[in-house]
Amino acid sequence: MPTSLQNLTVNFDERFDLKNIDWRLESGQHWLISGPNGAGKSALAAVLTGAGKVASGEISGLPQHVGWVSFEAQAELIAAELKKDDADIMDVISEGTPVREILAQESRDLVLIDELVAKFELGYLLDRAFRKLSTGETRKVMLIRALSNQPDLLVLDEPFEGLDVKTHAMLHDYLSALSPNVQIVMVLNRLDECPDFVTDVAYVEQGKLLHQVKRTDQAALAELHQLLHLKTTDLEIPPTDPTAENKLPPLDPAQPLVRLTGAAIKYDDTVIFEGLDWTIEPGEHWQLSGPNGSGKTGLLSLITGDHPQCYVNDIFVFGFQRGSGESIWQIKQYIGYVSTALQWEHRVSVSVRNVIISGFYDSIGLYHKPSETEKAIAVQWLDLLGMTARADEPFNKLSYGDQRLLLIARAMVKHPPLLILDEPCLGLDEMNRQLVLALIEKICASSGTAVLYVNHHPHDHIKGIEHFLSL
Amino acid sequence: MSQNYFNTLSLREQLAELKKCRFMHMSEFSDGVAALKGKKMVVIGCGAQGLNQGLNLRDSGLDVSYTLRAAAIEEKRQSWKNATENGFTVGTYEELIPTADVVLNLTPDKQHTHVVNTVMPLMKQGACLSYSHGFNIVEEGMQVRDDLTVIMVAPKCPGSEVRAEYVRGFGVPTLIAVHEDNDPKGEGLALAKAYAVGTGGHKAGVLMSSFIAEVKSDLMGEQTILCGMLQTGSLLCFDKMIAEGVDAGYASKLIQYGWETVTEALKYGGVTNMMDRLSNPAKIRAFDLAEEMKAIMRPLYHKHQDDIMTGHFSKTMMADWANDDKNLLGWRADTAETAFEKTPAGDMEISEQEYFDNGILMVAMVKAGVELAFETMTDAGIIADSAYYESLHETPLIANTIARKKLYEMNATISDTAEYGCYLYNHACVPLLGDFMTGIKSDVIGRGLDVEDMGVDNSRLIEVNAAIRSHPVEAIGAELRGYMSDMKKIV
Ligand SMILES: NC(=O)c1ccc[n+]([C@@H]2O[C@H](COP(=O)([O-])OP(=O)(O)OC[C@H]3O[C@@H](n4cnc5c(N)ncnc54)[C@H](OP(=O)(O)O)[C@@H]3O)[C@@H](O)[C@H]2O)c1
């Protein structure tokens, strides 16, 4: 019978909730639970051992014998041992429970214990007190305890953590051999350590089970990998090119980045909008929303200079009153821009690396010989995106979602005063949407760039945006 | 009746003008658009070139407005809409021409005499008149007021490309020239350079040439390889495939998209690369077919170049202009009635390689046409750079138009002048290749070679490869593409 969690919400002390989990573990499946730190991976694993208080929903089909190895289980056991010490203090000085006894407590097969002790080469400490062991040794004991219990379901939270290389390999082989008979669920921080027998991968974030990916779905797995990378990397937004060639002429900080006065877009007989006043000050994050056809993209292109009617409007951008003899390249140098249309226009054959570098020149395709600094910055961006290995691949061979990430990197590479994201998640599936949002949040948090985020759902927020304009 | 300007020159002057052609270095454009800054640029006509050049110039920070003939404004024609919807000021000749520092004549070539004669009296003393094609000056001998500067800035691409490449942050290869009889202040070159920067042309490469070299090479290229050969080839190959029992939808598709696919290979590595896309036995067949066709067609290419040089071509065409385009319109209608034009492309899949494998004859035609046009132009004294742009370089651009909507689209996109020359070529070339075509079977057009004959003789292959690679169009092509990719490092 499969184990099934239906719309399950579980409370773990005040700290943490798992919310509305729907999850089915079919027999024959082995799961890996992944997610950023603090996401609830361990909690989800622990639910399978009966941990937590079920607030709502249902859990069914849990097998009778569940083996559990985790730092929490380990800590609990040690805490219990220490308590015993306290209790015994009046009497004689306790030596603590010997390992031999700890192992026997839960075991259903004593012969198996001996076998495992030999495998883990722990014979030498069977008579020592459990609480006196090193962390690595304790871990091994915990593993033997769980394995010798002949569980139907084995829940392993970071089982390889703290093991030396040899033991790691041994345990890995042992679990592989065990896997045809015992269902295994393991929490791993690193997807690339995922053992071959794992059939399914779950991704948890903020207490929610967000993605369930079949191991055989290479593409989805790669995206998951990348998402995890973006969520967990310590890398920051790379700096911009400090050399003179790519330095933006400084703006007067007292002036707004953009000021539209009575702006309008009109065709023949239709008025898209008119009488619009809008000022964007340096560093202000804005969200622009409105239904399809309300003129969002048109409004943006008045700012970027892509709309021919920018010459018949009262527009002040980056120190220029439009139509006073400035060129669009003088305007565009201050803007990073991402949209679906821009993605379509990238049909030119250009490498992943050069797409990023082209951001320095505001061109679609690269028509300059890139400098060493520019190349180095592109590599830093690729590291951040988890795409280092793909630098020389043609851009148009990438998945749609990866292309979008690159275009955001391209837009940010020069740290523009204004970053315009026109429906940056349009056409993306959930996983890629989260990838893009993860990158945007990183940008909002760590640069002086004003972000102008366009979306037709006004309620679809990004952290850090505090100004709103609705068309 | 006007006097052909070229024919008024001495042979020595003619040769000197034809030879004028120099690839300009990027550093020569370091002044950007400064020479035009603050000057008033007024464009006459808002069609393919007019609108797109104007959009680019304005986005480069220049002051651009449009003047149209009165009827176009009154009737709010497409050209009026083009200009006003894009937020440009539009006015009559009387309103705008007197204010203009530079007048950009971007009306159809056949209107030039009339248009220039109309606006010239309204132009400011010392202003500049610019063209994007030199026909009016060279072939019609237009006499421009002495105080006016006359320049040419001719993008070597359709107007839509001129805009699209600019928006990407690049440009299209452009030819500039100063009409030396009209450069009273010696500022022609500075203005032409600034104009080329304003359209983005300097990023893709600029040839400094002469009105004469531009006209004589432009006419030659468009009539022969660019449009003529593709039209003749389309009709002959289609009819042959039908006669050989190839499915009509397949035949139609193979040709419609085949030109674009095989000539795309030219962009990257010239004729050599296009030929290298064929299997070895197919390459040898294509080579032999091309040699045979070159021998047959050479006199025709010579005739076209001769007629262009003597002015016979322009005289004939201008006679048709005077006759309300009777010939042109009749030939256009005939083209619409051809079997190829009327058979829609089938919906079968044809892989990129299959266009080469089953289109050996088409590859041979492109090779023969490019090489003959190039040889004929350079023999006539036109510099290799210019001959390259007017033959090999533009072939893929024209092939794209056939892929869009067959010959109709090609003839609609190119100028009337090119279209007229294209029909002349076609009428002569179809019968000329008649005997040759009787020997052609579907192995070289429609079905591909039998797999059994895949073996080749080594020494023959070496000979063929060497011959392909040593053609002079390959050397200049490699050099100019090298400049392009220095600037257009996009791989
Ligand atoms: N097409 C190309 O690929 C290409 C490439 C390089 C250079 N050129 C050159 O660029 C120039 C313009 O060609 P194009 O292809 O842009 O032409 P086009 O698209 O046919 O546009 C011509 C414009 O001129 C106007 N016009 C027509 N007759 C006129 C007249 N009698 N008086 C005033 N205006 C008139 C038309 O507007 P109305 O009819 O509404 O008045 C239209 O706006 C030509 O010299 C051509 O050789 C063309």
Image (spheres, rainbow, N blue to C red):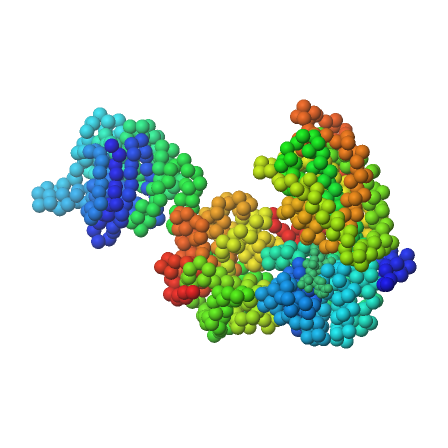
The answer to whether residue A40 is left or right of residue B62 is left
**Residue B309 placement (x, y as % from top left):** 85, 53
Q: Quadrant of ligand 1?
A: bottom right
* Residue A394 percent location from the top left of the image: 55, 45
Quadrant of the snapshot with the N terminus of chain A = top left
Q: Is residue B420 above or below residue A190?
A: below
Compared with residue B402, is residue A290 higher up or lower down, i.e. above or below? below
- Seen from the viewer's position, the closer of residues B110 and B75 is B75
Q: Quadrant of the C terminus of chain A?
A: bottom left
Which of the 4 image quarters holds residue A323?
Answer: bottom right
Q: How many marks?
A: 0
Q: In the rendered image of this protein, does residue A385 appear above or below residue B181?
A: above
Residue at the extreme left: A91
Is residue B182 visible to us here? yes
Percent coordinates x, y for residue A52 in the rendering: 21, 46
Q: Between residues A438 and B335, which one lies in front from this camera angle? A: B335
Residue drawn at the location 81% of the way across and 43% of the way down: B428
Q: Is residue B36 left or right of residue A233?
A: right
Across and down, in percent, residue B377 comes to 81, 49
In percent of the image, x 20 and y 51: which residue is there? A13
Seen as rendered, the residue at the extreme top is B452
Residue drawn 79% across the image and 36% down it: B434
Q: Quick check: B170 above or below B338? A: below
Q: Is residue B213 visible?
A: no
